Image (cartoon, rainbow, N blue to C red):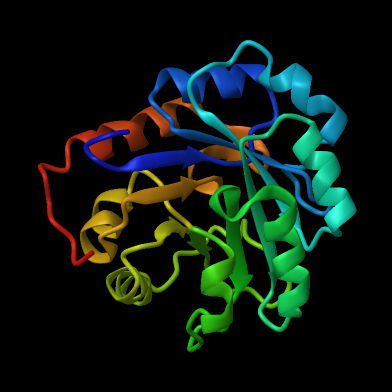
Amino acid sequence: MIDGVRLKVCGIRTRAEAEAAASLGADFLGFILYPASPRYLPLESFATVSQGVSGPAKVAVCVTPTAAELAAVQAAGFDRFQVHFRADTLLATVASWAETVGVDRLWLAPKLLPAADLPAGLRPLAETFLLDTFDPDKFGGTGRTGDWGKFARHQRAHPEKTWVLSGGLGPENIRDALQLSGARVVDVNSGVESAPGVKDLGKLQALVRAMAARGGTAGPG
């Protein structure tokens, strides 16, 4: 935790990246198991990349898995399960994910249109929700910032849930993002890379410095 905010570094692909993020105080490490992503990590590589890296919780990042696929991911030793999916996905499908890994360990990341709020039917199925920037063709990893006011509104309306801010966050805008969104958990990826799928230690260090130096700014959360 950095100045009261928990940090998730997503798109980890090497042990060096995992160790660097852990040493800088990351609370969560995200491993993307979606083959279409430039940050894809095959499930069989997870053990090698994460071996010996203690401290941060390990988050599996999936896109609309079947219950069986999610069970296989669970068996690999992850601590949390972040699932991206279209907002019109059947609630029964989402419920199967919650039943497989548990409501408390499931992070739901629905693909919401800019004007759309989180569907009420999803709230009982997870304790954590990740709001990312909408893109018609991608599930995250857009490198573009989202609607920080919308995030703050959701967090205010449902403080009993954990809300994760994602989308285009980096050292240059993290202080503004925290102030305007009130986020208590942030997810960074492309904003701390030198190229897609390659984490930049200097950018990650700069992000952590910016978070630690924000001077206790209070957001609307």
Above or below for 27 versus 220: above
Give the left or right position of residue 120, taking residue 209 as reference. Answer: right
Can you name the residue that lies furthest to the top here? Answer: 52
Residue 117 % position (x, y): 48, 83
Quarter in which the N terminus is drawn: top left
Depth check: 102 or 151 in front?
A: 102
Quarter of the C terminus within the rendering:
bottom left
Dividing the picture into quadrants, the one containing residue 12 is top right
Q: Quadrant of residue 15?
A: top right
In the image, what residue occupies the spot 48% across and 40% down?
A: 8
x and y percent of residue 220 in the render? 19, 67
Q: Where does the image place residue 4, in percent across and percent down from the top left?
A: 24, 40
Q: Nearer the viewer, residue 125 or 36?
A: 125
Question: Can residue 138 be seen from the camera position used here?
Answer: no
Is residue 87 visible in the rendered image? The answer is yes
- Residue located 67% across and 59% down the image: 98
Instruction: Using the image, determine if residue 28 lies above or below residue 64.
Output: above
Residue plotted at (71% across, 68% down): 94
Q: Nearer the viewer, residue 29 or 106?
A: 106
The residue located at (56%, 47%) in the rendering is: 190
Give the image location of residue 169, x and y in percent. 42, 52
